[in-house]
Amino acid sequence: MAKVIKRTYSLISFLLLLQMVYRIFECSTVRLEIYNTHLGFKKYSFLKWLTLTILTFGLYHLYHEYKLTRDMYKTITGMNNGLEISIISGAVSAIGAWIFMDLYQQSILSGLKE
């Protein structure tokens, strides 16, 4: 009986983790799509991000967060002081709290004028 409960718990944990990963990828692709639409051309690609992040063992993700946050901030707010924010975004991503940068980028995108 304990073995069945342990397997069930492991399966549920795996499914929840899989769903979380899927939601993160889905949100990332939507966020990039919205920003690319705002720019009028495809500057950022989810496939490029995924490929380079895997090939560089995650290092490209830090650069991508830095660059994307800086570009979003400059483009959408019209202010040129996005350097501090982009450096913070890279640092926050480096310590593993990347979800906060995703939320921040989403809040920047929420400021788009339709």
Image (spheres, rainbow, N blue to C red):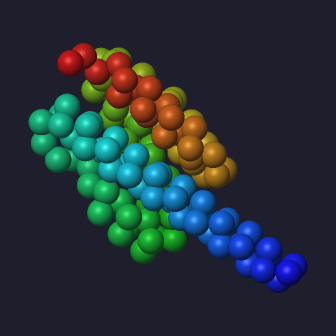
Above or below residue 112? Residue 49 is below
Q: Residue furthest front?
A: 1
Task: Work out whether 113 lies above or below 94.
Answer: above
Depth check: 22 or 45 in front?
A: 22
Q: Is residue 65 left or right of residue 112?
A: right
Residue 16, horizontal then vertical, whole percent: 60, 60
Q: Is residue 8 left or right of residue 100?
A: right
Q: Is residue 82 visible?
A: no
Q: Quadrant of the N terminus?
A: bottom right
Residue 40 position by quadrant: top left
Above or below 113: residue 44? below
**Above-or-below relation of 47 to 2:** above
Number of labels in the image equals: 0
Q: Residue at x 38, y 64 (%)?
A: 50
Left/right placement of residue 82 relative to residue 74 reads right
Name the residue furthest left: 40
Residue 6 lies, in percent from the top left, at 80, 76
- Pick the residue in front: 99 or 74: 99
